[in-house]
Image (tube, grey):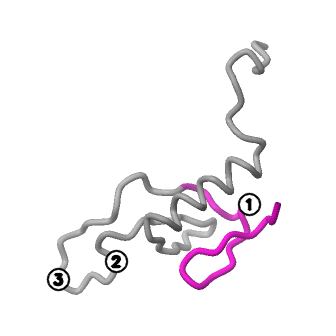
């Protein structure tokens, strides 16, 4: 398991990812170059833009890196 994932043409460390958008970007600006892309927000306010396939791979990599979601009975209630 690598601690890096590729988004666009960048090797991004998983620990730098703060959140990943669930919906594609839409701002309505005719000059926008990221319509339909998914935002991957990094620490320090940085952003990388991903295709839907890249976004899905990032989410899978984060879940695997953190050990997956697991089942409810595996969780400690306290």
Real-space CA distance between mark 3 and mark 2, rounded to the nearest whole angstrom = 11 Å
Helix, strand, or loop for circle 1? helix
Q: Nearer the viewer, residue 78 or 9?
A: 9
- Return the residue at label 2: 34
Q: Earlier in the sequence, mark 1 or mark 2?
A: 1
Helix, strand, or loop for circle 3? loop
Q: Quadrant of residue 32?
A: bottom left
Q: Quadrant of the N terminus?
A: bottom right
Tell me if residue 21 comes above or below residue 70 in the rendering: below
| Residue contact at pointers 1 and 3, CB within 8 angstroms | no
- Return the residue at label 1: 15
Helix, strand, or loop for circle 2? loop
Q: Residue at x 74, y 60 (%)?
A: 15
Q: Residue at x 42, y 65 (%)?
A: 38
10 Å neighbourhood of mark 3: few (<14), some, or many (≥20)? few
Tell me if residue 70 comes above or below residue 55 in the rendering: above
Percent x, y for residue 76?
A: 79, 17
Q: Residue at x 58, y 74 (%)?
A: 7
Q: Quadrant of the C terminus?
A: top right
Can residue 63 be found in the magenta stretch? Answer: no
Question: In this view, which residue lies farthest toward the front?
Answer: 53
Residue 30's tag is: 3
Q: Quadrant of residue 29?
A: bottom left
Percent x, y for residue 23?
A: 36, 55
Magenta range = 1-19
Q: Nearer the viewer, residue 57 or 43?
A: 57
Real-space CA distance between mark 1 and mark 3, rounded to the nearest whole angstrom = 34 Å
Q: Residue at x 74, y 70 (%)?
A: 4
């Amino acid at each position: 398991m690598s601690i890096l994932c590729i988004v666009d043409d960048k090797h991004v460390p998983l620990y730098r990812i703060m959140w990943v958008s669930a919906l594609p970007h839409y701002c309505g600006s005719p000059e926008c170059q990221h319509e339909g892309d998914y935002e991957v927000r990094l620490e320090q306010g940085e952003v990388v833009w991903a295709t839907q396939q890249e976004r899905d791979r990032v989410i899978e990599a984060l879940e695997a890196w953190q050990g997956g979601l697991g089942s409810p009975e595996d969780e400690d209630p306290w």
